[in-house]
Image: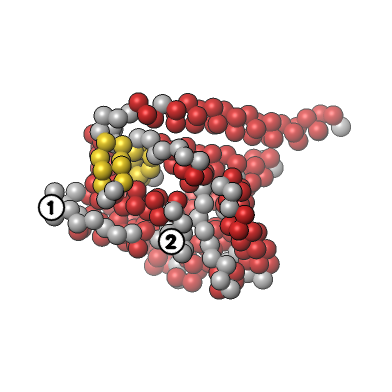
Amino acid sequence: MSDNKISMCEPKRRGFGKILMMSVVSTMLLGGCSTFKSNTIVDGGIEINDPFEEQNRMVMSFNQAVDKNVIFPVLEGYRTVTPKPARTGLRNFLRNLSNPIIFINQVLQGDAEGAGNVLMRTAINSTIGFGGLIDIAGHEGIEYEQEDFGQTLAVWGVDHGPYMVVPFIGPSSMRDYGGYLTDSVIDPVRWYAYGQDKENLYTAKFALNYLDIRDSLMDTQKELDKSSFDYYAAVRSAYYQYRKSLIADKSADKSVDVQNVEIPDYDDY
């Protein structure tokens, strides 16, 4: 009996250990961000710290090649075989699964109203919304709000830190990427999957999230690539504008709807 208790508790201990390690590493990294001041740019009133621009541009070139030769063809096939209502249902389902993380960040940000809305959305969509496939709560005026630990850190006064372009993922900042990793660690789906020896379940969720996010971004990426003089600078600017709008709660629907982000005119560069 005691052996069973130990084995049941082991995943939780590993989880808490990873959270502690993540917190320490994130604190060290974020605390060192102020030392990277070699390439500070002011774009649209937003201060961008990009000390790794040369390396970032190389990673972006790699990502563009992967996108054009692998990711975009897969996404075009996905759109061809999957009707839009089905893609919308998948997005709603994934949003519903992310509600516990959103709730935690709403609480950490001190947003009681936002936390209450998340609970209402979860209760409504998980029941009469068929597990979240149908966004009944959204139709009733309880809108989805994207909240992550990167935004929480911003509310706490933590700066972006250095701008980063991550292979296969794209633009981020040290703060936001650290926030993404933290959200991944505290995800209840991950805890359940690893606690039940069903790691493939969490892998499937990660893959579906990646597919959905890349699908939502593809048209905007193509438009930026086609219309901008400097694709790297355009993506960097759009990323910071989008994150600023999320943190300021300016967007009514804070999903990955970057198509509404203003694309700067680079003809003057």
At 54% from the left and 65% from the top, the residue drawn is 143
Label 2 element class: loop
Instruction: Where is residue 51? Give x, y as percent.
Output: 28, 32
Residue picked out by circle 2? 251
Residue picked out by circle 1? 268
At 52% from the left and 51% from the top, the residue drawn is 147
Q: Is residue 141 left or right of residue 267?
A: right
Q: How many marks?
A: 2
Quarter of the image where the N terminus is located: top right
Q: Of callouts 1 and 2, which one flags the residue occurring earlier in the amino acid sequence?
A: 2
Instruction: Where is residue 127? Give x, y as percent.
Output: 68, 67
Q: Nearer the viewer, residue 8 or 57?
A: 57
Q: Is residue 37 left or right of residue 178?
A: left
Q: Nearer the viewer, residue 195 or 237?
A: 237
Going by the numbered disc 1, the residue's amino acid type is Asp
Distance CA(mark 1)–CA(mark 2): 28 Å
The extreme right residue here reads: 1
Instruction: Where is residue 70? Give x, y as percent.
Output: 33, 51
Work out whether 45 lies above or below 21: below
Work out whether 22 lies above or below 66: above
At 19% from the left and 57% from the top, the residue drawn is 265
Going by the numbered disc 2, the residue's amino acid type is Ser
Instruction: Where is residue 74? Give x, y as percent.
Output: 37, 56
Q: Nearer the viewer, residue 21 or 30?
A: 30
At 49% from the left and 50% from the top, the residue drawn is 207
| Residue 230, disc | none
Label 1 element class: loop
Residue 235 appears in the figure:
no
Which quadrant of the view contains residue 246?
bottom left
